[in-house]
Image: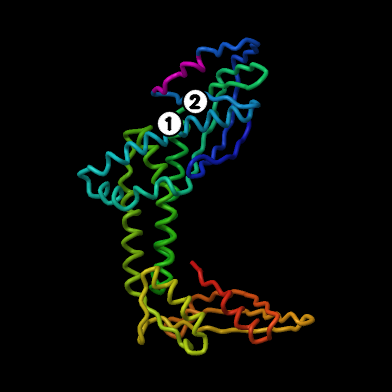
Amino acid sequence: MKKNFLFIIFASFLFIACSSKENIELKTNNNLPSWYVKPSANNSLYLYGVAEGENLDKAIKSALISISSKLSLSIKSNSTLEKKSTFKYREYISKEYIENINSSTQELIFQDYKVKNIYNNYKNVFVEVEIKKSNLIETLKTQIKQLISNYYIKKSSLKNKDPYSKYLSYKKANKNLTKYINKVQILKTLDSSYKEETFYKILKESKIKQEEFKNKTSFYIENEGSYPLISSKIKSFLTKEGFIFKKNGNYKIKIDSFLQTKDARGIFIAENSITIGFIYRNRTIKSYTSITKGISSNSIKDSVDKSFQNFDYNFK
């Protein structure tokens, strides 16, 4: 019997699983089975989890969560130990990314899990679930290999791009790679022969490249005087990202606004379409449009002012 389950744990784990069942027990007494009281220990071939739930599906999901919890605790311990590592790539990852492991969204796939035992006391369902390690290992290897391949494909496509576009691409790549630290560490825990150096190499490279192209990017706003409030918000956002503004910046930012106003029986409404263009060497390389509204009972001008105030520059 095969089932697929989607659910979230800690930093949002995804489990896609197929199951088989055996040893179904129906008992009416309050004595819990020994396999639940003393769960099976993980071994070289299998991972185990036990849990209870108000129905079978919820019990199985909780058991899979239990397995993930054990793996998560394991990698947290490993991450702490890696702070003392003598390997440079390990030291880099530990210092730069240790705090991101728990906050990143992770996807973990459990295939062909087996429900070994079920106990129903007519209040809750208790289950024991078994995962084959080799299946999980191969799935993780495939995912990480694909991630690395995608990184190199994207990298080769950036050769003729401008510095800011390269920065954004490496920033996105670094974010995606960071999410996989968890998986790489789980894989290394399950398979000590796995060589993770390539992953850590490109993770470090993506961060270095991100900083390199950030430092090659500077901005100035062409019509700052016409749009002081919007200009201030753009400057605030980009300076927080680590960019600088200067008179001869290599990127020109141009602000355009298209206003529509109406009077709805004494309620003044302004709809403002604000476009932010990034121009590099006389070519617009990026353009963002935001539509804001301003509503006022005082005047059209007041509604227009509010439409600019409501502009939120948070493009990434």
Type of residue at label 1?
A: Lys
- According to the picture, the residue beneath numbered tag 2 turns out to be 49
Residue found farthest to the front: 298
Q: Are dots 2 and 1 in contact, CB under 8 Å?
A: yes
Q: Is residue 108 shown left or right of residue 177?
A: right
Q: CA distance from mark 2 to mark 1?
A: 9 Å
Q: Is residue 31 shown left or right of residue 218?
A: right
Q: Position of residue 73 (x, y in %)?
A: 39, 35
- According to the picture, the residue beneath numbered tag 1 turns out to be 70
Type of residue at label 2?
A: Gly
Q: Position of residue 197 (x, y in %)?
A: 30, 46
The quarter of the image holding the N terminus is top right
Q: Is residue 10 shown left or right of residue 295?
A: left
Measuring 75% from the left and 83% from the top, which residue is drawn there? 263
Image-quadrant location for residue 210? bottom left
Q: Nearer the viewer, residue 273 or 287?
A: 273
- Give the SS element for disc 1: helix
Q: Residues within 10 Å of mark 1 (few under 14, many from 20)?
A: some
Q: Is residue 89 magenta?
A: no
- Magenta highlight range: 35-43
Image-quadrant location for residue 123? top right
Q: Position of residue 270 (x, y in %)?
A: 67, 81
Check the image and report above or below for 252 versus 54: below
Q: Nearer the viewer, residue 229 or 99?
A: 229
Q: Is residue 36 magenta?
A: yes
